[in-house]
Amino acid sequence: MKKTIIIAFVILFSLGIYATDARTHSTVAPYWTIGDDVNILLTPASIFDHPDHVRLDHLLDDRDYNGGLTTTLLPNMKLGIFLGKPYRNNLEMIWDAPGSDTTGVLSNDMEPDRNILDVVLAFRFGGLDIGILANYLTDSYDEHYSEKDIPISVGDYEIGYLIGISEVNFTLDFTLRQFSFFEKFSFLFDYGIPSHEFLEEELVYNGADWDLASWETNTNGAMYLAFRVLFDLGGFNGAVTLQMDKLDNDNRYIVDDDNDGVLETDISEAVQIGITVFEAGVSKKIKTEKFTLCTGGYFRLSKYRYETEEYDNIGTEIIEQWNYLETDVDLPVFAWVEYHLTKWMYLRFGARGELLDSGSDEEDDPDFAAGTNDYTYTELYKFENNKGSYIRLGIGFLFRNITVDLSISPYHLLNPHILTDDQHQPLYRASIKYIWN
């Protein structure tokens, strides 16, 4: 991670009642434990909990800026527009889990890094808030290069790559205030449609003609789907999530010697990926005039399924299958505190650890001969991961209606190379916000 020269700006960074991305980042806690305006992109009806503002966030390790604004259109209607926000789909496992990266599809690693546009529109009907979020991202990569002698000779080549990704996501948020014995009760529905295409073509001169090799991948059905329930009750915050993701890809590899249309190799591969996650957690806040303390934990059970089958289109037979199932059980716990050092200066501390982090892998690898499965290798492996821990610090100052926040790494806080290109970044994120209403 490269250094960014920000020492001159540290004295301006502030933290207020309504904070920014850096504040949430420094707590090392789930989004539902802290009532921050960052949550607008995850719980769109919560836009009513925050004043109108414009904001700018800076991811220091990526030298990346993004921002947006919220505004009141009518007394019971609010709008939020955000540009270039980091990719942070709350159903992100479909991108991150091994083998399920739809932007790479087991070929090239091209992950989405930011949304192009996020739009939030919310309406208030008495004690019911309805929030709608829509976001969109797209990215592409197109490269062609060649190496040819004059005149052309054996081994000269042309290579072309074309990679494209796109994704549309929607969230519908129904939030009831003072519902039964809850201060706030929310039901959310998330739905997303990702797609991917990948094409690589290679032409090599054989002395008489050009040999063609081609690799192609296309998404054949993919979606994110999740249901979430959030609640506030007497200082307790809770969340329950059920997530179900699906991704099917069609891959094809061909070889055409002399590029004459007669294929020497033609192999198709069907890939099916499924991810199911259940998560439930609770936290408790204690507030005084000087500080806010929050502690809690959550349970997560996730299942990841990967199945692939390769088929020889020339020999009309199955040549390979591989089935993989991974089950993970996690029990993270966390605590964060925000201390009001003065009216204009705040300090934060966040810590997180794992009480349990274990799982199992199950693998089936059939062996095919002449299209027939004559042997299957099966392995079941149970494991327990090292129980990691994370600590972050935060600092900020509040001046009138301007707030600026810092998220700090305690491990590199005393790094003497802060003005150089040393790879240890002591500052994670910075945020500035102006509140006008």
Image (cartoon, rainbow, N blue to C red):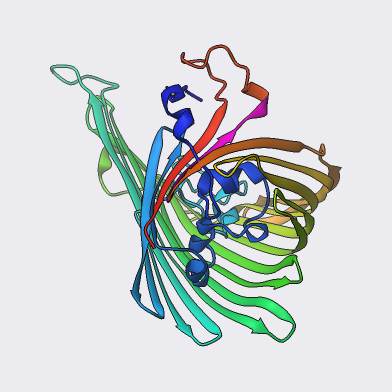
430 or 8: nearer the viewer: 8
Vertical order, 105 against 298 (above or below): above
On the picture, is 214 further left or further right than 309? left
On the picture, is 336 further left or further right than 247? right
206 or 242: nearer the viewer: 242
Q: Position of residue 359 (x, y in %)?
A: 82, 50
On the picture, is 92 further left or further right than 241? left
Report the label total: 0
Residue at image point 80% right, 50% down: 333
Q: Position of residue 6 (x, y in %)?
A: 43, 25
Magenta span of residues: 401-410
Q: Residue furthest left?
A: 151
Q: Quadrant of residue 345?
A: top right
On the picture, is 421 further left or further right than 31? left
Task: Residue 163: tell me if it is visible.
Answer: yes
Q: Position of residue 13 (x, y in %)?
A: 48, 36
Vertical order, 157 against 356 (above or below): above
Residue at image point 57% right, 46% down: 23
Asked if the magenta segment contains residue 407, the reply would be yes
Task: Residue 371: tell me if it is visible.
Answer: no
Q: Position of residue 87 (x, y in %)?
A: 47, 51
Task: Look at the magenta stretch and give its main secondary structure.
Answer: strand
Q: Quadrant of the C terminus?
A: bottom left
Asked if the magenta segment contains residue 357, the reply would be no
36 or 377: nearer the viewer: 36
Residue at image point 59% right, 64% down: 245
